[in-house]
Amino acid sequence: MASAVTITAPSVKHILLDSLVVMKIVKHVDSELQAGISEVSGDACAGVLTGLVFLEDSRLEITNCFPTVRNEPVLDDDANAAQVYEEQKQQEMLDMLRKFRTMNIDYEIVGFYQSHQFGAGFTHDLVESMFDYQAMGPENVVLIYDPIKTRQGQLSLRAWRLSTSALDLASKNDWSPELVKAAGLTYENMFEELPIIIKSSYLNNVLMSELALAKSYSPEKFSTRNFDLGSKKSLEKSVRAMMGNVDELNKSIQSLTKYTMDKQRHDNMVFSMTQKRQQENEARIARGDPPVPLDDIRKLKAPQLQTRNGLLDELLASFDTNALADFSKTVTGENITKLFIAESVADEKVMGTKDRTLSSVSTR
């Protein structure tokens, strides 16, 4: 991450998303999921968003997008392969933006999109990408697409950006407990979510209205897939991911507790040594001797938190756990509602069968 970046507060309050962007994102992610590319490479589907920023309306309009190429496996004996591939990736992105400009399509980069199951998948690399994009333009955002929830019949697209406090810490690349506490940063205010309004063309709206008012419309023609309780696998995956995050948080809590105790012990030792040195200096001054400086005490190395990225991983794990818990709560609530509806329908069918049986017996 860059160290000297001017932090500018964003002014965009909502996002106007074109339906073409939604279609292209869904098609891109579904094609890679069906081909199994995501499982093989281990990377999420990603792409670049283009559009326009309207500051007078505090609106970000996303009008188009295109996918980015995936990272190719790098051999251990080829040290320059990663750098060459990144340069090639940047060149392909510039070529695509140049084609957009030639075709009179909005070519201003306004963010990027990624697909993550259950809406959880915020990693250190994603935070770095968000910081780079927001440093390039303060109005840039990231769209997180959830293919699992979309396949269950609910389109899941959420727009996020780093808060001003998180941007400040990311520019310093320092997520130490002291700075995080001074900034008042938690997993709840680390990211800011923006409301999304999906815009369709007038012809599309007219078509949907005609389909809704058509005489051939009949509720009986629709299947009962909305009452399907086939969410066991997705719910199990979310719970397992949540358990893994909780285990990581427990390890982080132990490391943070050890760091707090070592820091308190170090501060007490520095305070006692400073007091003792000051008393010795007062005695030396009284005898007419020069005082001893405190440089050796100030050079004592303070304890470090035994984590790779400070508290960043803990904040991201907490945010992912919260997202997984929300998904599990939503799915569980929907399944309970479906169970009650299915039970009432089954009871009505049983009662109707009994009534027909009794009526047939009485007629005989």
Image (spheres, helix red, strand yellow):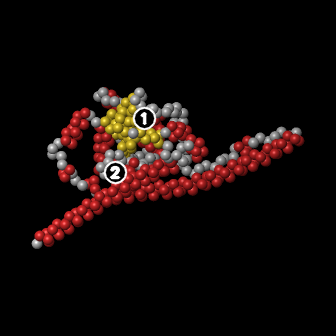
Q: Which residue does the image show at 47% across and 54% down from the upper left? A: 245
Tag 2: amino acid: Ile
Which residue in the structure is indicated by mark 2?
148
Q: Which residue does the image show at 39% across and 39% down from the upper left? A: 195
Q: Check residue 13 in the rendering and tell me which mark sits there, or answer none.
A: 1
Q: Which residue does the image show at 79% across and 44% down from the upper left? A: 278
Count neighbours of disc 2 (C-alpha within 10 A) and say few if under 14, some if 14 to 19, many if 20 or more: some
Give the number of the mark in front: 2 or 1: 1
Q: Which residue does the image show at 58% across and 45% down from the upper left? A: 181
On screen, 201 above or below 227? above
Query: Which picture quadrant has residue 238?
Result: bottom left
- Which element is circle 1 on? loop
Q: Is residue 59 left or right of residue 223?
A: right
Instruction: Return the x and y of residue 338 as percentages of the image width and height.
Output: 31, 57
Instruction: Return the x and y of residue 307 as percentages of the image width and height.
Output: 55, 50
Count neighbours of disc 1 (C-alpha within 10 A) and say few if under 14, some if 14 to 19, many if 20 or more: some
Instruction: Return the x and y of residue 267 as percentages of the image width and height.
Output: 69, 48
Q: CA distance from mark 2 to mark 1?
A: 28 Å
